[in-house]
Amino acid sequence: MMAFAERVARDASSIAKADVQALRDHGFTDTATAAAAARCFFSKLLDALGAEPDAAYLQLEDALQQQLTVGRAISHQATEQLPDPGPEPGLAQAKP
């Protein structure tokens, strides 16, 4: 699976039906194969956008941090927080 994921990241157009069948023959489901390909796509998208892992990564053990960030600089800014939109319309509010 790792060799497949590397090929997807390097040249996805080189993947052929035989490559997918080889994964099936090793017991991987199509769902697992799709998840690996999607993860590669998402990583490429983050690279293309210049996204940085957020500051929460600084709390991880060094070895895990390096595996998850793969050479990307970690942002030292706080994680972006979305504003609280308030209560959802139509839901009853709990009384204090």
Image: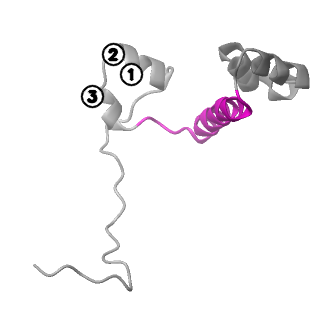
Above-or-below relation of 4 to 78: above
Please state the extent of the stretch shown in magenta in the rendering.
29-53
The mark found on residue 59 in the picture is 3
Please report contact status of discs 2 and 1: CB closer than 8 Å, yes or no. yes
**Residue pictured at 31% horizontal, 24% vertical:** 60
Indicate the position of residue 31 as horizontal and vertical percent values. 69, 35
Q: Indicate the amino acid at tag 1.
A: Gln
- Regarding mark 2 in the picture, which secondary structure is present there? helix
Query: Left of 23 or right of it: where is 64?
Result: left
The mark found on residue 65 in the picture is 1
Nearest the eye: 77 or 7: 7
- Regarding mark 1 in the picture, which secondary structure is present there? helix
**Residue pictured at 33% horizontal, 66% vertical:** 83
Indicate the position of residue 27 as horizontal and vertical percent values. 70, 19
Circle 3 crowding by C-alpha within 10 Å: few under 14, some 14–19, many from 20: few
Please report contact status of discs 1 and 3: CB closer than 8 Å, yes or no. no
